[in-house]
Image (spheres, rainbow, N blue to C red):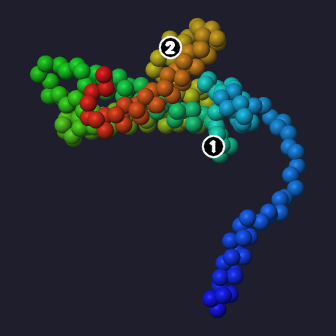
Amino acid sequence: MIRTFLVAAALAGASAFAPSAQPMRTATTLNGDMSKSLPFLVRPDKLDGTMAGDVGFDPMGISEIQTDLKYARWAELKHGRICMLAIVGMVVQAHFHLPGAAYQEPDPFLAPGVVGAQSNLQILVGIGIVELANFDKHYGEGEPGDIGFGSQFLIGKSPEFIAKTQEQEIQHARLAMLGFTGAAVQTLIYHTPLL
């Protein structure tokens, strides 16, 4: 019995080093355009360069899941704008305080507990009003991210200027999302001001 087990174990170990049958490989050609951001990957069909900031970056294939990329662009712009404000807020909060103000906590993660429920509720209601006012715009016609604030400055501008401005905004939004992540991690680890 032991001898049979040892022989079976030896054969099993030896079979790991035996060559296995390889399936027949066929040559494939890439008929699609290559991505600008990852030149070794094929550009996804929906990322055709018509949206600002579109360089064909979708290594996880999320654009194939989304039925409408306008919703994804709305989310990207919204999160980017919030992160741009958050970075400015973290720096201002840590280094500038009004004399006699009740709000003196320099750590942004401890600040919501210091100001109390009433101030936090005001912020939550303000965010809710903006979200409800723009709820139906996420899937409809129009430009992603246009909440009716600031778009009057683009009236009468050339299409090239508008495209450049939209490209700059999405690049700054993406940078702010990365920057906020780094700032949040640094603050949570060291509990020191950013600058």
At a point 51% along the width and 17% down the height, the residue shown is 151
x and y percentages locating residue 181 in the rendered image: 41, 34
Question: Which residue is identified by label 1?
Answer: 60
Q: Residues within 10 Å of mark 2 (few under 14, many from 20)?
A: few
x and y percentages locating residue 178 in the rendered image: 46, 31
Q: Secondary structure at mark 2?
A: helix
- The circle on residue 177 is none
Residue 67 seen by the camera:
no
x and y percentages locating residue 43 in the rendered image: 72, 34
Q: Quadrant of residue 183?
A: top left
Left or right: where 181 falls relative to 91: right
Left or right: where 105 falls relative to 136: left
Along the viewing direction, whichever of 170 and 20 lies nearer the viewer: 20
Question: Which residue is identified by label 2?
Answer: 152
> What amino acid type should be assigned to the residue bearing mark 2?
Gln
At a point 64% along the width and 40% down the height, the residue shown is 59
The C terminus sits in image quarter:
top left
